[in-house]
Amino acid sequence: MQSRAVELLVGFFVCLGIAAIFILTMRVSNLADTSDVNGGYTVIAAFDNIGGLKVGAPVNLAGVRVGRVADITLNQQTYRAEARLRIGEKYKLPKDSDASVLTSGLLGEQYVGIGPGGSLKNMQDGDEFIITQGAVVLENLIGQFMTSMGSDNSSGGGGGSSGNGGGQNALPAP
């Protein structure tokens, strides 16, 4: 009888542990908090490159989460990625705000950062951002850096002088 009580107690604590791990996982992944997605309005941001932006990624304004990425599609006419951003109803974005795909940290998750504009009119459901900045792809930056370093090294590297005797003019004497 006593071993049965111990088994029930162990089973209870195992279930409690599994539930705690599930709750912590949901909180860390931000999947449980959909309060900013259920209400509010949807705005559209078209980007040349969204990098690793995913549906469900946060939308931040001044470091505060104001919404989530609700959907990502490819516009077949412009060949740009269109992200539908679900903004919480308590947040009003000026019509001339801009949207950028940013990365938290060097290799962290990507999110949409909103830069507030100065317009007195606010964005409405279905409005589109006029100014957007796509993701900065780390591989492209490294490639550009390597290319510029290669062209600097192959230009002769003479320290800026023309190599004709201490910087004197190279024009022939009259």
Image: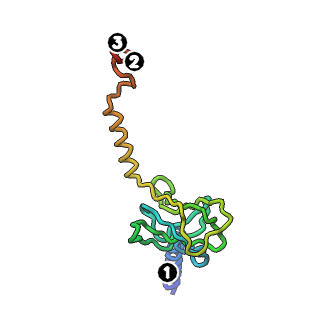
Which is in the foreground here, disc 1 or disc 2?
A: 2
Residue at mark 2: 167
Corner quadrant of residue 99: bottom right
Q: Amino acid at mark 3?
A: Ala
Residue 76 image position (x, y, % from top left) = 38, 71
Which is in the foreground here, disc 3 or disc 1?
A: 3
Q: Amino acid at mark 1?
A: Gly
Q: Residue furthest top?
A: 174
Local crowd size for mark 2, using a 10 Å CA cut-off: few (<14), some (14–19), many (≥20) = few
User: Which of the image's four quarters has the C terminus?
Assistant: top left
Dot 1 or dot 2: first in sequence order is: 1
Residue 96 image position (x, y, % from top left) = 60, 62
| Residue 24 in view (yes/no) | no
Residue drawn at point x = 51 percent, y = 87 percent: 1
Looking at this view, is 165 or 25 the one in front? 165
Residue drawn at point x = 41 percent, y = 52 percent: 138
Residue drawn at point x = 35 percent, y = 25 percent: 158
Looking at this view, is 15 or 74 the one in front? 74
Local crowd size for mark 3, using a 10 Å CA cut-off: few (<14), some (14–19), many (≥20) = few
SS for dot 1:
helix
Q: Which mark is residue 159?
A: none
Q: Residue furthest right?
A: 120
Q: Residue furthest bottom?
A: 1
Residue at mark 3: 173
Q: Amino acid at mark 2?
A: Gly
CA gap, disc 1 and disc 2: 87 Å
Q: Is residue 24 shown above or below 108?
A: below
CA gap, disc 3 and disc 2: 16 Å
Residue at mark 1: 11
Residue 155 image position (x, y, % from top left) = 33, 32
SS for dot 2:
loop
SS for dot 3:
loop
